[in-house]
Amino acid sequence: MMRNVLEEVRSIFDCDRAYLLYPCNPDSDSWTVPMESTSLEYPGAGIMNVDTPMDPEVAEKMRLLLACDGALKFGLGPEHPLPSNISQRFGIKSFIATALHPKSGDTWEFGIHQCSHSRIWTAGEERLFLEIGRRLTDALTSLLVRHELQESEAKYRRFVETSSEGIVGLNSNHIITFINARMVGMIGYSTDELIGHQLSDFIFEEDIADHERHMTLRRQGTSEQYERRLRCKDGSELWTQVSASVINGDSGEFQGSFAMLTDITERKRIEQDIIARECDFRTLVENSSDPILRYDRDCRRTYVNPVINQISGKPIDSLLGYTPEDTQLLSDSEARNLTTAIRQTFDSDQACHVDFNFIDLNDEIHGYDMLLVPEHDADGQVMTVLGVAHDITERKQAERKIAESEQKFRSLAESLPDNIILYDRQGLAIYINPSLEKMLGENAVKLIGKSVRERHPDGSYEAYAQAIDNALTSGEDDEIEFVVPNLGTATNPVIHQIRIVVEHDEQGEVTGVLAIGRDISEQKKAERELNEKQRLLLEAQQIAHVGNWHHDLVTDEMYWSEEFFNILGIPPQEPSLELGLSFIHPDDKQKLFNDIELPVNKDGDFEQEFRIIRPDGEIRWIHSRWVRINGENGNEIKRVGTHQDITERKQAEQEMALLETAVNRSSDAIYLMDDQTTLFHYVNDAACRALGYSREELQTMSPPDIDPDITDRKNKELTKEVVEGTPIAFETHHKTKDGRIFPVEIHASSFEYGDKTFSLAVARDITERKQAEEQLQQAQKMEALGTLVGGIAHDFKQFGYISASACR
């Protein structure tokens, strides 16, 4: 409608644009043109339908309009100059405007623009413009009021539809004419099932009479609040708190009622439970062995259970209606403390404990712990305080014992050399003994109340802190070995064995942990040294091919070393007697069994040599040495021994036996001499036969003892010559045990064995050769003599011939 009015205004004034601007407020951040009529050639701000930021020129224009009772003209002549920005932006040559003040909301601006040419507005046009402005103000007022009413109705409807309370509208005949979504959800019927029905259709039969009574009050114009039980669609009860108001017509006649209903079903259920619990409460407390009392807001007793009469001897009626300070059940100071605690419970709405002593009929002192609990009414307000007193005499005695135990603990902890620290449930230190204080080099006061991580933020104690956390979380004891930072050296660190013991209360809840640390640096050092010795032993066993074993005959536990398994040629596994016997060579088993059953010698040692067959078929020789260990009763309880692989030794012995056999089969005498002692180290059988000495006798003799031609000096010279690496051969004579001398030919050389030098001499008897040589020499001499004699005879013949001739 307003847009049509603006169209008419533009037609009346034959202008290019008519508009309504909002707000006409120079202090506003922006302005907009919600309604506008403009020619196609000159579109205005309304077509953009956006907020335009306020600029100084527009703000100044608005101030002028607000200060003026009539209209302001902008353009030619004495009129106000055009605002340059909006004039250029919207092509304005001249315009007239006025401020409109509707009864609702902020000020509006009404104006018309001339864009096609400059224009001087006449007085008649100004009067007509202002009249139209006044009518527009009335129209705007009506429009804005209706808009606000629509918004208000929409807000009210949204409130009704989204209200957390059920809302019901009834006409004069109490028929449902309106119901909101919340009420529909509460009662379970749909809107169509509720609208047009009497409210009594949804009320239980036994409640109809009371419902009619309240409806009569509505007709009489009475608004009220009351409780009403409704029947849900599923037959269940819906208890509501009804706030009902009367709706009257303009003339005061009754037109219906309006009600807001709050769902109190849960509260009613709680109230019913309270009633039921009150019965249960009475049954419980009347038979309780603990004193139970109830106090009102004035701290007066409203209930006392029978046990109080039994322990105090006072009639229950004499106690009801009195405060703790009115009747002498307690001492004055303890009565005041109890009264203070009751008031505190009322004020804070929080349960609390209070301890007091009570002297019973037998003049015995009992300690009591009373728990004061606030009791609430249906609105959640503290109505009474219930006190339940529990006899803690035994607990008090236990606490005294704990205190005594605590003192003993401190005395013990402070006299022990171990480091002891006690942590609470939060992991904060609450006790540190002097030994730990001394080790840390800090006063215990600086450490109390701090966690491990707070004391060592650099993370150096993180492993220890984690162990404390785990114990507090799991409730299980633990034990760790911890290298203490900044103490000791890399090769000799300071190591503590820390036992973490979890402490629990009577309910089994974790209350803290006790950490007991002991310096085991020397022990760990000894372990390292032992491990090193064991490593060296293992290496020695591997080098010597020696494995050790032991067998506990009582527990049947058996141990084989790693080298023991290596000797058998199998990987380490569970040892057993059957496994060991399975490797024994079949030909050696019986002898092995026989040796095992032999009587123990004076040392209790056994030695055996036997063969084993490895899994790969290789046969190895084993030298076994073991001892029996007897118990106090003389019975054998354990066997301990070693197995050594002597296969190479056996092979060497066999080779030596073969070599000795070969040497002894030689017809030449063979002598092996130690060059340091020059004694015979070994002689073969041929040497013994040649000289008539036994081998033992010869092994105590040297070359000069059997060779008359060799002196000690000559013997040293020959030995030196041989040792220098030159084999020699020479002839000499040997002298037998019975004094016979015979010629021999010696071939000698030397060699090194181990760290010694030996000379080897092979002596051959050359008696026959010498005799043959002598016979040959004799024959050669006879032959030479014959030759000589023959020559002489020839010479004589010649001489005789010559002589005869001469004679002749």
Image (tube, helix red, strand yellow):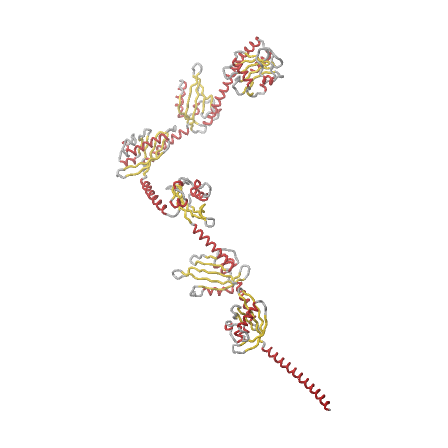
Q: Position of residue 400 (x, y in %)?
A: 32, 42
Does residue 88 appear to the left or right of 523 in the view shown? right
Tell me which corner region of the image, top left, top right, bottom left or bottom right, holds residue 290: top left
Which residue is most to the bottom?
808
Does residue 143 appear to the left or right of 636 in the view shown? right
Q: Does any portion of residue 283 appear in the rendered image?
A: no
| Frontmost residue, 162 versus 612 | 612
Relative to 289, is 211 above or below? Answer: above
Relative to 28, is 641 above or below? Answer: below
Which residue is most to the front?
806
Q: Position of residue 74 (x, y in %)?
A: 57, 13
Q: Does any portion of residue 137 appear in the rendered image?
A: yes
Relative to 582, is 775 above or below? Answer: below
Q: How many marks on residues?
A: 0
Relative to 623, is 272 above or below? Answer: above
Quadrant in the picture for the N terminus: top right
Q: Position of residue 45 (x, y in %)?
A: 58, 19
Q: Position of residue 262 (x, y in %)?
A: 43, 26
Quadrant in the picture for the C terminus: bottom right
Does residue 278 appear to the left or right of 723 in the view shown? left
Which residue is most to the top?
124
| Frontmost residue, 718 versus 69 | 718
| Frontmost residue, 632 versus 666 | 666
| Frontmost residue, 415 versus 610 | 415
